[in-house]
Amino acid sequence: MPDPYSLLKPLLFRLDPERAHGLGLRGLRLARPLGLFRAPALPERELRVLGLRFPNPVGVAAGLDKDAEAVAALFALGFGFVEVGTVTPRPQAGNPRPRLYRLVREEGLINRMGFNNAGLQALRRRLESLRRESLPGPLGVNIGRNKTTPNEEALADYRNCLEGLHELADYVVLNISSPNTPGLRELQSREALHALLEPLLECRDRLRPSLPLVLKVAPDLEEQEIEAICSVVENLGLEGLISGNTTRSRAEIASHALAGEEGGLSGAPLLKRSNRVLELFRAGLPPSVALIGAGGITRGEHAAAKLQRGADLVQVYSGLIFRGPALVTECRRSCLDVLQREAQ
Ligand SMILES: Cc1cc2nc3c(=O)[nH]c(=O)nc-3n(C[C@H](O)[C@H](O)[C@H](O)COP(=O)(O)O)c2cc1C
């Protein structure tokens, strides 16, 4: 039987990318009860990462389901974990449209969405209606600050989100790496990071000590910046790190007509850069800090390569747009091979 996504993709790609995204998410929700796109049963090797059980190491990256509208449907594709958000304390519309572009031949996306999301209270209601215990894998919530909150007050935004969502997530991601919220990436510097993480860890210890906190960083970091982040993460005892977000670099697509569009580049053109940064983080962090590798996975072997470079888990976003649900199965298969070989 042909892959149903190969029939749908030409239709979706004729639409504006953001409209296609909305339709795709709605379609997934509708398709779930009909069993369309249901993932094949594969042998799995359960993993324990961040103190949680994962049926497989392949997850949905943040931003794909910002408001947790399709969590169960995404799990039905075979993902081992799903991360929703980024959520901000107050709802926000994000940047004006158009703000999402496809680089079709390159299998890349450029986005400057700007944390469009329905806000903390709406996400709370959505997550309360989800029975988390019935999901096959962990649910992560990715949190950020509102565009109008200056960095000096960012801590209050992250703290509000943590206080509002700590009971509803299996792990929480502190996103300080979107290129589309002005100034956000400055929180990655040693002093700013320490000043943000220390009180957030205290807050977590007070609310729910067993809740893992994970930091999401950019792939546009110099070696010295990576060293500084590793030392803060290790000293404060943070549980995990996601490497990484979209890139501001256009080196891989310099001559493309869309190269001048503002925003973060993701998908295939990000693979090499994200793998390099992943290796530096693995070398710089103790094994006790879980590492999640994201960026440029468009084939199963790319997911496996991230595990081989030291990632404990991987995440996918853009690849799903270009390859559809078959990519999830491909990644699960390739990762299983790596995990089985490592276990021998
Ligand atoms: C349209 C779009 C929106 C995104 N929104 C978010 C977001 O809200 N929060 C976040 O942490 N990452 C966001 N990301 C980044 C992805 O989670 C991921 O880190 C990045 O795209 C690299 O993975 P990929 O190459 O598989 O897409 C977004 C990516 C895209 C393409």
Image (tube, rainbow, N blue to C red):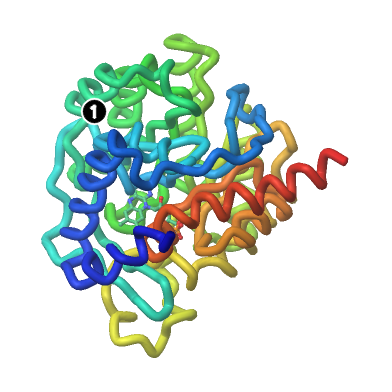
Q: Residue at the location (47% across, 11% down)?
A: 208
Identified at 44% across, 65% down, the residue is 267
Residue 257 location, x and y as percent? 29, 87
* Foreground pick, 344 / 216: 344
Q: Amino acid at mark 1?
A: Leu
Residue 23, compared with residue 265, is above or below; it is: above
Q: Is residue 75 left or right of residue 336?
A: left
State left or right for residue 29 relative to residue 213. left
Up-down relation of residue 91 to residue 243 (above or below): above
When asked about the image quadrant of residue 235, the answer is: top right
Disc 1 target residue: 123
Q: Dividing the image into 4 quarters, which one contains the C terminus?
A: top right
Could you say where residue 168 lies in the image, as x and y percent from the top left?
A: 36, 19
Q: What percent of the width, then of the height, locates residue 211?
A: 50, 19
- State the quadrant of the N terminus: bottom left
**Image x and y of residue 286, in percent:** 74, 38
Q: Residue at x 30, y 71 (%)?
A: 102
Q: Nearer the viewer, residue 119 or 190?
A: 119
- Pick the residue in front: 302 or 118: 302
